[in-house]
Image: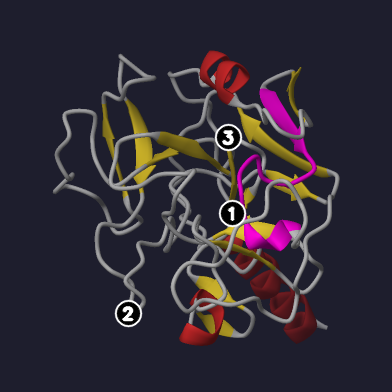
Amino acid sequence: MNKAFYLILLIGLASCGRERPPVTPGDVSIASVVQSNYKNDYTHEVSVQVNGDNLTINSTGLPDHKTPYWGKGHEMYEEFPGRNHANMNTSMISFNYSMTIPILPNESSFKEETELGPVGMALNGVPIYNDYEGGGLLQENAWGTFDASGGHPGPREDYHYHSEGAYLTVDDANLIGFLRDGFPVYGRKDMDDSYPADLDENGGHTGVTSDFAEGIYHYHVSNEVYSTSGLYVIKSGAYHGTKGTFTQ
């Protein structure tokens, strides 16, 4: 009896040790920036709702720019760049995405690694993915199917971005979107047109941006060419804050 009791006690203590600490709100609100920047001028199907301490961004996930994945004959069709080609998913369809993020994002003591699937949402409502695809890290068989915007559809015909590209960001300081922890992600440059030299291991730092004059932690598209792709991935590594939900 005593041995069983101590075994249960040890398991309980170990489980408690793995619990995440409570989320404490940060000091900088992202509400006005999110509400004024999320839109899709082509589909007109991006909206933002305030739900207590959170923001919920709704989207169909379809882009507002040209891509070969609209299909030949579509008014927004364009050819693939260079030798790129369609993957097995030659088209894309709409979804009912909802990403919920905190209005006051804050650093988490538990840095959760990003995983396969949506890690954020671009301002036009398209999901942002990290440097993983399918069973592992991005390989040529994946990036060889990217359109000019660094995007392609997944197995469910779900279009998403992996890297810097036309219509999104190209070697600039543009606001791209927000990740699931509520922190913004920008292009490769800071607002002074320089490349940041103090990024942490998760690709971000704290500082003033064109949207946050008081300063905020924010991510940047990597300024290092990914493998032999010639591309710059949007996100790798862990979240700085606590991950919100992304439903589809």
What is the magenta range? 54-70
Residue at 17%, 34% in the rendered image: 193
Residue picked out by circle 2: 227
Left or right side of 238 for 120: right
Q: Which mark is residue 119?
A: 1
Q: Calculate the distance from the C-alpha at mark 1 to the C-alpha at mark 3.
A: 13 Å
Question: Given contact means CB atoms under 8 Å apart, are the residues at marks 2 and 1 in contact?
Answer: no
Q: Name which residue type carries label 3.
A: Leu
Tell which tag, 2 or 1, sits nearer the viewer.
2
Question: Given contact means CB atoms under 8 Å apart, are the residues at marks 1 and 3 in contact?
Answer: no
Left or right side of 194 for 180: right
Q: Is residue 148 above or below residue 247?
A: below
Check disc 2: other Cα within 10 Å, few if <14, some if 14-19, many if 20+.
few
Tell which tag, 1 or 3, sits nearer the viewer.
3
Q: Tell me, yes or no, whether the highlighted magenta stretch contains residue 55.
A: yes
Residue picked out by circle 3: 123
Q: Name which residue type carries label 1.
A: Val
**Observer-nearest of 209 and 151:** 151
Residue at 47%, 33% in the rendered image: 106
Question: Given contact means CB atoms under 8 Å apart, are the residues at marks 2 and 3 in contact?
Answer: no
Question: Quarter-wise, where is residue 70 in the image?
Answer: bottom right
